[in-house]
Amino acid sequence: MTHLLESEVPSRLFDRKLLRRLLVYMKPYTGQMVVALLLSIPVTLLMNYLPLLAKQAVDDVLTVDAATLSAADKIARLNHLGLLFLGMSAVAMVFRFAQGYVMSWVGQKILFDLRADIFSKIMRLPLRYFDRNPVGRLMTRIGSDVDAMQRLLTDGLIGLAGDLITIIGILGFMIYLSPQLAAILLVLLPVLFTSLVYLNVKVRKAHREVRRRQSALNSFLQEMLTGMTTIQLFNREGH
């Protein structure tokens, strides 16, 4: 059985054909995903503007000479900036909660559709398929593997789009504040991208090993538990 447990389907780092097959499950929920993506825009704008409020508090209030701005005026401006900071943070949290709710709803719907289709597929398979594939491995595919695909479709793709909006917003604010520092950051981006690609390869190998061992463990437990009745019938518990 070892060769069955250790078999792996080779795959590329990025498989467009497989991605297109997975995107079919996202199509019925396109509207909800667009809403989740649009909700990330105000979150990005609000969260990126908060550091500017801190900058105003330091540059326009705390470091201003007392002859130019009295202590009472400083306190009043700091209170105003503080309330504005708290208000914008609260609004951003509301938008973020709404985005998370929509993404969770879409994720659970996709999870249900995936598992329903896989279960229907398994029910139509011939008996010889179950002779070659342990039930534990099938349970792993229906369980953890489907969860991983659901996270890819929701947290992965939608999260990636939201992260791109965040990065664009951050770069825009950086260019507005200091074009020189923004240029230095852009020079370092290729190095960061190369590091992420290298890390992705390592994490991918480790994740596949975790899946292989989990499948082997589930298969072992399934065979031991289902064979327990037979062992007890022949009174061979001691062996």
Image (cartoon, grey):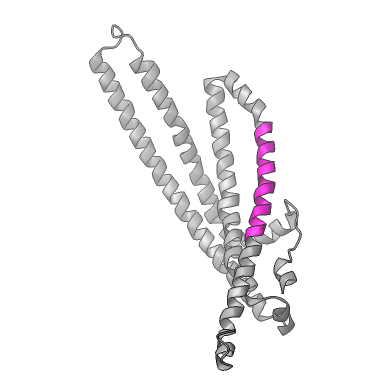
The residue at the far top in this view is: 67
Q: Is residue 216 visible?
A: yes
The residue range painted magenta reads 191-210
Q: Is residue 23 visible?
A: no
Q: Is residue 54 above or below residue 130?
A: above
In which quadrant of the rendered view does residue 59 lie? top left
Q: How many marks?
A: 0
Q: Is residue 28 above or below residue 86?
A: below
* Quarter containing the C terminus: bottom right
Question: For this rendering, which residue is in front, 57 or 169?
Answer: 57
Q: Residue 149's x, y, as percent?
A: 61, 60
Based on the picture, tell me whether residue 209 belongs to the magenta stretch: yes
* Quarter containing the N terminus: bottom right
Give the overall secondary structure of the magenta segment.
helix
The residue at the far front in this view is: 238
Q: Residue 26's x, y, as percent?
A: 60, 59
In which quadrant of the rendered view does residue 197 lie? top right
Question: For this rendering, which residue is in front, 237 or 90?
Answer: 237
Q: Is residue 227 left or right of residue 52?
A: right
The residue under the point 56% across, 92% down is 235
Q: Residue 207's x, y, as percent?
A: 64, 55
Based on the picture, tell me whether residue 67 belongs to the magenta stretch: no
The residue under the point 74% across, 82% down is 128
In which quadrant of the rendered view does residue 233 lie? bottom right
Q: Is residue 81 left or right of residue 113?
A: left
Question: For this rendering, which residue is in front, 46 or 146?
Answer: 146
The residue under the point 26% across, 12% down is 70
